[in-house]
Image (cartoon, rainbow, N blue to C red):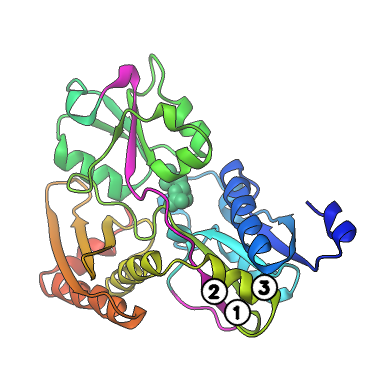
Amino acid sequence: MGVTAAAQGLPAFRVGTRGSRLALTQTTTAARAVAAAGGLEPELVTIRTEGDVLTGPLSQMGGTGVFATALRAALLAGSVDLAVHSLKDLPTAPVLGLEVAAVPEREDPRDALCARDGLALTELPPGSKVGTGSPRRAAQVRAARPDLVIVDIRGNVGTRLGRVAPGDLDAVVLAASGLRRLGLEDAITELIDPSVMLPAPGQGALALECRTEDASGDTPLAAGLAAVDHLETRLAVTAERALLTRLEAGCAAPVGTLGRVQGGEVVLDVVVADPDGSRLMRRSGRTAAGDVEAARALGIRLGDELLADGAGRLARLTL
Ligand SMILES: NCc1[nH]cc(CCC(=O)O)c1CC(=O)O
């Protein structure tokens, strides 16, 4: 990408990314969109994060942000100008000096079942082994199919998909968006309906983060970021993340939620699960689709309702 910058004389900007194939794919796409809208030339900088190096169960890995911390440090140090995160991996706590300046239009937020022989969740024989490292996915699979066996797995998308094999797993659950971005959608045997499985807050969406001083003003980067921001996605994920913050739940918590804009309203569905799937607490709410503050208030209100019903103990569990 860097070669044409000199040729065309476009100003360059450096974009930080994790080194996984999924991260590189989504960073390249997002960076090109920002660059095209802003009249810039992107230069990708690969950054190794703690989450790429450690190999233990993700749910035991020292809390939130293992993927985001190194990218944020690079932004603050000035070694990159933009970081592209999977929004669901981005901790909700704000970082002084940084800002999520754009949230592009979301991909399919649903979870996908990738099973042997084209099977759907209801078709898996009793005792089938389903792989996931996510307490949220595990709890919702258990609630729908208490007769299945959950196997804790981790690794990148390709590794997890490869576990569906004779003598190993019968199925895995992965984000549809990640599979699509990698061109692996043929492996999907069922897009699990949100009434059965609510996704992680922010799933399918990207967060484009930069230094606050670069987020606005009359610069090519600010113009490029403003052009790719998608209001409906931002309203939905703002409500989802406000809910998560209210529950003080981390990315490994058994909390599923999906916001959407529908008929002029932001609608938010939430589930907080007992890890064994024996108890699912559900809530839904809506508010007029206006500014992000109204969307945030909706997430906080549903969070308060769930806390009043005792969801706090469940939400803060990480395993
Ligand atoms: N937890 C890892 C992770 N972080 C982001 C995605 C891709 C989906 C997305 O963009 O939200 C994935 C893979 C998965 O959950 O299957």
Q: How many marks?
A: 3
Helix, strand or loop status at disc 1: helix
Helix, strand or loop status at disc 3: helix
Is 79 situated above or below 270? below
* Residue type, numbered disc 2: Ala
Callout 2 touching callout 1 (CB < 8 Å): yes
Query: Which of the pair 14/116 is nearer the observer?
Result: 14
Question: How far across and how far down the image is residue 87, in percent?
Answer: 46, 61
Q: Which residue is mark 3?
A: 221
- 124 within the magenta span: no
Is 42 situated above or below 159? below
Q: Is residue 180 visible?
A: yes
Question: How far across and how far down the image is residue 47, in percent?
Answer: 69, 56
Question: How far across and how far down the image is residue 55, in percent?
Answer: 54, 44
- Which residue is depicted at the point 57% across and 50% down? 26
**Mark 1: C-beta under 8 Å from nearest atom of ligand 1:** no
Query: Which of the pair 246/201 is nearer the observer?
Result: 201
Mark 2 or mark 1: name the one nearer the start of the chain: 2
- Which residue is depicted at the point 19% across and 45% down? 276
* Residue type, numbered disc 1: Ala
Callout 3 touching callout 1 (CB < 8 Å): no
Q: Residues within 10 Å of mark 3 (few under 14, many from 20)?
A: many
- Which residue is depicted at the point 29% across and 32% down? 190
Q: Which residues are magenta?
A: 93-119
Q: Which residue is mark 1?
A: 215
Helix, strand or loop status at disc 2: strand
Q: Which residue is mark 2?
A: 101
Query: Residue 11, labelled with which disc?
Result: none
